[in-house]
């Protein structure tokens, strides 16, 4: 969409998956949308940005609608006028365009799927059949809006060709009367009414002109319906010449011989099936990342300067790009960087390990002109992702892998898309080189459809007999051992069994589920006989359609609880599904949970059925090892947030919280970092629930997540780091959970800085809280500090129930060091409401002290000067050198 230009677009008949890609993109990019009210599905409008201004056109008149659009266009905004169906059919767009012409506003139109075609699809009919009708008329019966002379319904009925009637259902009896009047249609002529075509409550009424009016009245249909009339509804026309074997045209010669066709590779629209992270640095780069993330259902990481708080958008400090990518490296299957390729190369260089395990990396320029596959083009899928981005944005996919440059399908690319395991990666380079160089390659164990990918390459040959080995330079085997007499390079591939994940509405018939699985297999070039397992959510364990499909195919079934499915990192989660079944993904998550392999077909929504297909196990042996390595372990990161302010937190702590999968902590501390977490994926408890919090952190980390355990000050100073290490061991999770500790600014340091430098030499810290340490032990420690002569910092000095202990402690220091000993108290150190006092011990305002206060006590080297409290280090005694 162009700023300052108004785009008219058709939202289709209703189903969100019938949106065209261009309309989907326009909705995601628009600053203002004027939409056709309840005729546009809420699921369609959900693609709009949260900050997009949305106006229902139903209560507005023409002037109000055009004023909204013109004013927004003059402000340079991207304006979308979203009509139902196709805007060119009964869309009332011409009158709007005339006003825009008068105002000097430019506009454009994006077509949509009209309801007549959705209705025909619902009926599974062709409206133009040889021998019956080669015409289809779209019209309406005159109502409050008259029709021009010569366009009365009876005049079109006189032709007897297929008719699609809009806006006519309210007087069905009158429609029938008009249709029968000329005589071309008879009472036996087939007729059908489709109410809300493609919507969940779609209703179909079939009949003839003799009974259709009565059936419609019985069904209670009075609006939002398409009427289709004509003999074509019976589907009994003559065969066309288009596919007749004795009919020649520009793409096929006439032939009387039967033709044997190899099944072709069916290419789906979007081919990459993994979690995607996008990164933007500049204003334009961030906007590109943001808009593309909505199309790819990805997470956009945008520079904090240009952050807009959109859904699935996370801001970051651009100076911290390298640690951000490092933390995300294994969390995402692909990284799309909207920036210069040189920046990306430098940032990812330390992270690269192997083409078997590295995620895909794609570089996209800000203007979406070029999408360059940088890392893991085949196994990782970067080439496929580039092609997806090209489809969505028009960017040119830049693929530099030798096989793709020469127009060949590399063997690792074929394996990655078909779900074949590469058993000997060391031979892959030799075989791909042979492919590019045009050497003779034998294919052993490949079916006809699997060989079809290479049917245009004369240097690849099926091997059926051992004698043929002498004719080839290299060999690829599929589920077959290499023949013993072959000495050349040989690549061994194995077909992995497949698992299908299924989600569906209640009561969907088995035939519809089976059809959805077949269509998904066809889209992604997968062999349905390889499916061995079927998985879904536990709520579907008694769904008749699912059980019938599994039984008919002999598939083992798995019905997993929602709590298990929500742990899976599915690439296409849904908030609607999460609200319905308590997990954001069913088909994809079930596939990943059961298969523990590669998602070959990401979520495909086919009417009321959702399908995903994946492998049982990884594509390479090293991937399998990596999935069980330390990289796959969960982690607790015990993080000290200092005083809890943004300024008082280290970059390392900020990054760790921002990029953690979830956050666990004391309620007050979690509130202090809401600017980082957005309240998402946070588990918090009140005081005295430390073990409960730590155990929750361990449980989540054991599920493979990175958990930020939030602590005030420093995690290792009266924090939770030690308890986290202890609970991991107690709960027996040492093999699955690592603990990392990130330092923070502890309160004694913040308090000391607030009043000067009282802790310049040796000092001791003592907590006066007796909840975990018996009082008699605290007293012994205080006695030791008093006699040591060290300065002292007292944590947790005084509570409402514990006041006498502080009095006793101060009395001990006064007796040993004198009542004029320099002291300070600092409340809420490092926070916006910080308050401090400095003075002699005898004047300390004890009533100002509470649990958020630090008490600092000096020694004989301490003094107060000009209101500042500091301790001499003794440099004056040191000789100069």
Image (cartoon, helix red, strand yellow):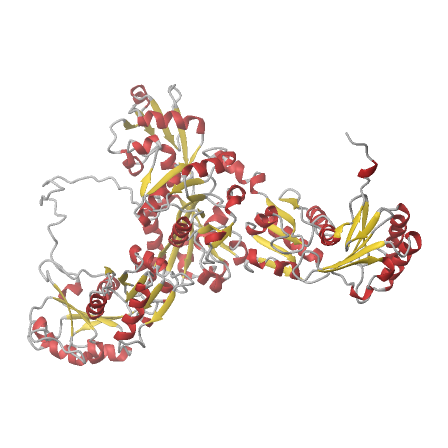
- Left or right of 98: which side holds 701? right
Residue 17 pos. (x, y %): 33, 59
Residue 420 pos. (x, y %): 40, 37
Residue 55 pos. (x, y %): 35, 70
- Left or right of 193: which side holds 184? left
243 or 413: nearer the viewer: 413
Residue at (28%, 28%) from the top-left corner?
A: 461
- Left or right of 807: which side holds 173? left
Q: Is residue 557 visible?
A: no
Quadrant of the image containing the C terminus? top right
Q: Residue furthest right?
A: 815
Give the image quarter of residue 494.
top left
Residue at (17%, 40%) from the top-left corner?
A: 259
Q: Answer above or below: position of 266 versus 808.
A: above
Give the image quarter of residue 836.
bottom right
Residue 525 pos. (x, y %): 33, 43
Quadrant of the image containing the N terminus? bottom left
Q: Answer above or below: position of 879 versus 283.
A: above
């Amino acid at each position: 969409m162009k700023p300052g230009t108004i785009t008219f677009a058709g939202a289709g008949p209703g189903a969100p998956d019938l949106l065209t890609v261009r309309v989907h993109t326009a909705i995601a990019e628009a600053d203002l949308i004027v939409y056709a009210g309840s005729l546009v599905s809420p699921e369609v409008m959900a693609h709009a940005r949260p900050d997009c201004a949305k106006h229902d056109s139903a209560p507005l008149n023409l002037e109000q609608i055009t004023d909204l659009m013109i004013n927004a266009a003059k402000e340079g905004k991207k304006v979308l006028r979203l009509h139902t169906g196709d805007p060119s059919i009964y869309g009332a767009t011409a009158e709007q365009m005339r006003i825009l012409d008068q105002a000097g506003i430019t506009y454009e139109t994006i077509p949509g799927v009209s309801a007549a075609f959705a209705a025909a699809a619902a009926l599974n009919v062709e409206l133009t059949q040889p021998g019956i009708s080669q015409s289809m008329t779209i019209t309406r019966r005159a109502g409050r809006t008259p029709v021009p002379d010569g366009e009365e319904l009876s005049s079109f009925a006189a032709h007897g060709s297929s008719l699609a009637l809009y806006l006519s259902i309210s007087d069905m009896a009158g429609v029938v009367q008009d249709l029968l009047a000329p005589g071309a249609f008879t009472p036996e002529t087939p007729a059908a009414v489709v109410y809300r075509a493609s919507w969940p409550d779609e209703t179909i009424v079939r009949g003839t002109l003799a009974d259709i009016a009565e059936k419609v009245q019985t069904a209670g249909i009075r609006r939002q319906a398409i009427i289709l009339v004509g003999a074509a509804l019976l589907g009994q026309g003559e065969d066309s010449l288009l596919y007749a074997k004795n009919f020649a045209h520009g793409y096929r010669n006439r032939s009387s011989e039967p033709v044997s066709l190899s099944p072709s590779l069916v290419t789906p629209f979007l081919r990459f099936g993994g979690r995607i992270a996008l990164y933007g640095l500049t204003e334009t780069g961030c906007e590109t990342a943001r808009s593309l993330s909505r199309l790819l259902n990805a997470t956009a990481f945008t520079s904090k300067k240009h952050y807009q708080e959109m859904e699935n958008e996370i801001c970051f400090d651009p100076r911290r790009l390298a640690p951000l990518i490092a933390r995300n490296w294994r969390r995402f299957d692909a990284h799309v960087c909207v920036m210069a390729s040189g920046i990306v190369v430098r940032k990812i260089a330390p992270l690269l390990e192997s083409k078997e395990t590295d995620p895909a990396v794609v570089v996209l320029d800000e203007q979406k002109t070029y999408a360059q596959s940088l890392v893991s083009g085949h196994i990782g899928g970067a080439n496929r992702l580039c092609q997806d981005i090209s489809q969505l944005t028009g960017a040119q996919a830049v693929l530099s892998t030798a096989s793709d440059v020469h127009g060949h399908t590399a063997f690792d690319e074929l394996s990655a898309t078909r779900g074949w395991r590469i058993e000997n990666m060391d031979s892959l380079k030799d075989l791909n080189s042979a492919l590019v160089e045009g050497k003779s390659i034998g294919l052993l164990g490949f079916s006809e459809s699997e060989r079809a990918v290479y049917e245009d390459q004369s240097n690849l040959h099926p091997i059926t007999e051992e004698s043929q080995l002498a004719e080839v330079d290299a060999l690829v085997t599929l589920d077959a051992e290499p023949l013993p007499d072959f000495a050349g390079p040989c690549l061994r591939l194995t077909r992995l069994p497949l698992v299908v994940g299924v989600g569906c509405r209640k009561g969907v018939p088995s035939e519809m589920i089976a059809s959805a699985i077949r269509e998904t297999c066809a889209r992604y070039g997968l062999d349905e006989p390889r499916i061995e397992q079927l998985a879904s959510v536990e709520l579907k364990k008694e769904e008749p359609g699912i059980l019938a499909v599994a039984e008919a195919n002999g598939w083992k079934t798995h019905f997993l609880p929602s709590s298990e499915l929500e742990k899976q990192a599915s690439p296409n989660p849904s908030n609607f599904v999460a609200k319905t079944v308590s997990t954001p993904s069913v088909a994809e998550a079930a596939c990943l949970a059961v298969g523990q392999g590669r998602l070959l077909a990401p979520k495909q929504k086919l009417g009321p059925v959702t399908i995903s297909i994946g492998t049982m196990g990884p594509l390479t042996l090293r991937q399998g090892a990596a999935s069980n390595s330390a990289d796959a372990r969960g982690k607790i990161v015990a993080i000290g947030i200092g005083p809890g302010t943004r300024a008082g937190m280290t970059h390392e702590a900020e990054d760790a919280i921002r990029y953690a999968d979830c956050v666990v902590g004391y309620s007050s501390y979690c509130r202090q970092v809401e600017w980082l977490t957005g309240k998402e994926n946070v588990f918090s408890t009140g005081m005295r629930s430390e073990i409960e919090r730590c155990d929750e952190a361990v449980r989540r980390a054991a599920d493979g997540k990175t958990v930020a355990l939030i602590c005030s000050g420093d995690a290792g100073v009266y924090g939770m780091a030690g308890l986290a290490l202890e609970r991991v061991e107690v709960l027996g999770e040492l093999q699955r959970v690592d603990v990392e500790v990130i330092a923070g600014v502890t309160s004694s340091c913040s308090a000391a800085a607030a009043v000067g430098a009282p802790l310049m030499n040796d000092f001791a810290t003592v907590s006066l809280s007796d909840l975990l340490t018996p009082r008699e032990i605290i007293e012994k420690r205080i006695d030791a500090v008093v006699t040591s002569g060290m300065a002292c910092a007292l944590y947790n000095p005084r509570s409402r129930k514990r006041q006498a202990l502080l009095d006793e402690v101060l009395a001990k220091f006064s007796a040993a060091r004198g009542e004029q000993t320099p002291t300070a108290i600092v409340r809420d150190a490092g926070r916006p409401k910080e308050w401090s006092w400095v003075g002699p011990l005898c004047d300390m305002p004890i009533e100002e002290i509470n649990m958020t206060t630090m008490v600092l006590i000096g020694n004989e080297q301490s003094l107060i000067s000009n209101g500042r409290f500091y301790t001499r280090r003794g440099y004056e005694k040191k000789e100069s050198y």
